[in-house]
Amino acid sequence: MSNNRLTRRALIAGAGAGGLGAALAAPVLAQKLIDLGLPGGPSLRPLEPAFPGKSEMIVQRIRPPLLETPMAAFREGVITPNDRFFVRWNWSMPTEINAAAHRVAIGGAVKTPVSLTLDDIASAGETVEVVAINQCAGNGRGLSEPRVTGTQWGNGAMGCARWTGVRLRDVLAKAGVAPGAARVRFSGLDVPMTDGAPQFVKSIPMDIALRDDVLVAWGMNGEPLPLLHGYPLRIVVPGWFSTYWVKMLATIEVLTGEDDSYYVAKSYRMPEAPITPEDKDFPTVPITAMPPRAFITSHADGAVVAKGKPLTLEGIAMGGDAALTKVDLVGNGLAMTCTLGPDEGPYAFRRWSVTIPQVTGDLANIGVRAANAKGAVQPEALNWNPSGYARNVIERITLRAQ
Ligand SMILES: Nc1nc2c(c(=O)[nH]1)N[C@H]1C(S)=C(S)[C@@H](COP(=O)(O)O)O[C@H]1N2
Ligand SMILES: [Mo]
């Protein structure tokens, strides 16, 4: 990529000046519907190209936008195009950004508080690229049984992009981290829509913040970040759920103690140990690193395949917070190791394929099971929790032989 450098011109162009506010406020829905196969509730959603910079997306909510990627978009390659990438905002987002006036304030436990322009950030260090999966912690929660509260996502609240930016640690060095620093907290330009509601702020531990591949990013698949994805700057934490990937970055605050803010201390938490839906009081921990997952993209549940013929299945898989090591086809008496496609790095999707020599009958409840370099393997049973976080049960489909 030639235009890795952040330039003010590129950023202003990236905002797609004008029209976005109106388009986001009142998209015209044509009501073409898609069935997400959600067991616990209404399963149909509009499938729409009505959002700025987006082609067909599953509309979960209009304002603030919650757009899901149709599984069909994962059939090609490992990079999710920007116009098919899922969108999630907790609160309403600004629809115009003045890039020239934008500043990122760094404060808290630092030697010198600073207020940085986009050019300051761009020149803070070496330009770095990382291919990484951005996955909502609630991805697939709509498939939970029993049903859980929250956006009823199918499995399309994920995507993989090539992110360009500078290391967060180089940006932090502009202010100088003071002794005793424990966490780094981020906020964006979006603010709550109701009085007294908490702002969406998130923090990560210092050792994660200083990692080589944790970025303040401005580029997504070779383009300036689209407004919906956090223009002009967002945090990228490869291997961690995207709740930490704060968009429209406005402040960076170094903390010396624990973070008691709402979205860290109260929300985005998982039971510390497995629970049942009847359990009420249990200790929780923040959701952080992603576990491995794999998906069949070549065939949908219920698809018809040719009896007596070989059958090739294909899909995508991810290692989560460590490299993918293995994908196995399982179920219906099958136990085959899949062939993995090109490796785009430990945090990217990787394609897999496998050929069953001959289909002899229906293939009931087959699935693919991913494992990663830390020894994590997808489980047989759903790790049920009240918010449906970190789903990584083996996903099953049934194919009919004819
Ligand atoms: N400023 C800001 N950043 C945010 C959020 C938000 O509401 N505001 N939501 C987070 C959550 S929960 C998710 S899943 C991702 C979604 O990123 P995307 O819209 O680029 O796919 O953004 C994260 N960063
Ligand atoms: Mo999310």
Image (tube, rainbow, N blue to C red):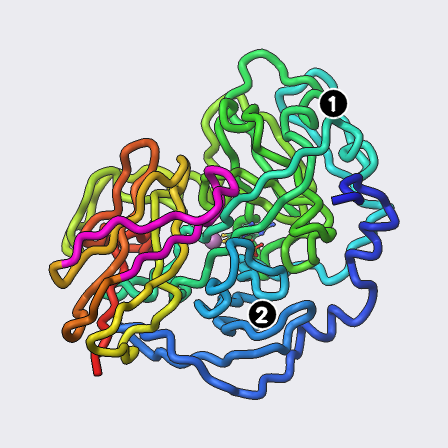
Percent from the top left, x then y, of residue 299? Answer: 34, 71
Q: Amino acid at mark 2?
A: Arg
**Vertical placement of residue 1 versus 27, above or below:** above
Identify the image quadrant of residue 214.
top right
Picture quarter with the C terminus: bottom left
Q: Who is closer to the viewer here, 222 or 121?
A: 222
Q: Is residue 246 visible?
A: yes
Q: Amino acid at mark 1?
A: Lys
Q: Which residue is mark 1?
A: 174
Percent from the top left, x then y, of residue 123? Answer: 80, 30
Mark closer to the observer (1, 2): 1
Percent from the top left, x then y, of residue 203? Answer: 52, 35
Q: Who is closer to the viewer here, 130 or 13?
A: 130
Q: Is mark 2 within 8 Å of ligand 1?
A: no
The reply to whether dot 1 and dot 2 touch (C-beta < 8 Å) is no
Q: Which residues are magenta?
A: 334-355
Q: Secondary structure at mark 1?
A: loop
Classify residue 266 as left or right of residue 8.
left
Q: Which residue is mark 2?
A: 63
In the rendered structure, does residue 227 fall within the stretch colored magenta? no
Count of marks, rendered view:
2
